[in-house]
Amino acid sequence: MTPSGGRYDAIVLGVGGVGSAATYHLARRGASVLGLERFDVPHCRGSSHGRTRLLQRSLDTESTTMALADRAHDAWRALETETGRDLLTETGSLAVAVGGDDPVASARQACERHDLDYDSLSGADLAERFSGYDFPDDADALYQPDGAVVASERGVVAHVAAALDAGATVRARERVVDWEPVDGGVRVDTDRDTYRADRLVVTAGAWAARAVDALEGLLEPCRHATAWFAPSGDRSASLATGDRLPPFVATVDGENYYGLPGPDLPGMKFGRSDFRPTAPDALSDPTQADERPLRAFADEYVPGAAGPTLRLSTGLVTNSPDGRFVLDTLANGRVAVAAGLSGRGYKFAPALGEILADLSLDGETEFDISGYALDRFE
């Protein structure tokens, strides 16, 4: 039977952060491409919402992820130029350790190994330099002047807009129900139509294991909550005036927290590494129980951004067994997959999209992705 929906060079399953970038890079290279999204573009059910992501290169201690971070930074800037949208804000960034293990030491080593600029600070130095913070005087901290914040939903919209300008087709509210290899390509069945393509790109986030049998049982979708608090008190001036406190990651007695300013709300967004396994279709709304530990952290350590709650949100993080990406091809190269991004993927989205386009159109990429192969779990 001839598919009614048409034939494409590539179909992208999932048009979130990475899927929108893959759709863009495929279309930009002249491929006929269809992006299929089961929800809206953008939407708040997956891993690409929440307004902001932190681009902090000292956190990417492996040379491969450092290369991805460098490429992504340049690609975000190029996308800004192409679309006329503000996506990346240079803010500087902090890594802070209070008690227990000190991950700042490894971040400092990464900076030295890759020749990155940084300042070593104590908690007392932080309070003097950024008055909205109140970490203990003996806290260990590292400041990177090249840290930046990416506007996440804006990035999805920018990639989709640029992809459409390059000739792509994007269809939201269309759920893929099945696909199979056929005649040197793939057939994709949705709840609306049937399509064929030479190549399939799977960027389905928490739903990836439903689309790719080889991922079944490997990936763990988890619920993740964040909170936005307004500026507060005398020390909120730097937040309120636009001379914002830099975003941070902080480890307090072994528990990880983070905070990022803006871009569309005053104050800061707070989150922590509290990932609760959940079925992706059963994501629950945020509660006061989600807010309380974030409020307690802000009250104690970031009083300049511990004002009234402005927003609570939940989303999904999809973890791989080792916390590293899955980037690979299947079905004799007809299917390219990016999955299990483990809460670290969005900032790399334009670079990952470029890699997926390379794999789909060329069968290879200049980036070293050998460490992300699916067979490492065999």
Image (cartoon, rainbow, N blue to C red):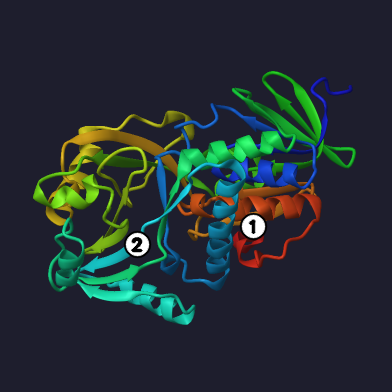
On the image, the x and y values in percent for residue 371 come to: 61, 66
Q: Residue at x 61, y 61 (%)?
A: 372
x, y percent for residue 112:
43, 81
Residue beneath the point at 48% across and 37% down:
46
Q: Earlier in the sequence, mark 1 or mark 2?
A: 2
Contact between marks 1 and 2 (CB within 8 A): the answer is: no
Q: Label 1's element?
A: helix
Image side of residue 248 versus residue 196, left or right: left
> Quick check: can you spot residue 77?
yes
Q: Give the class, few, some or many, for how many residues have Cα within 10 Å of label 2's Cα (few <14, many ≥20).
A: many
Label 1 to label 2: alpha-carbon separation? 33 Å
Residue to which mark 2 is pinned = 93
Count of marks, rendered view: 2
Query: Quadrant of residue 246 in the image?
Result: bottom left
Find residue 374 and name its label: 1
Say which mark, if any, is on residue 250: none
Task: In this rendered view, identify the residue nearer to me: 176 or 68.
Answer: 68
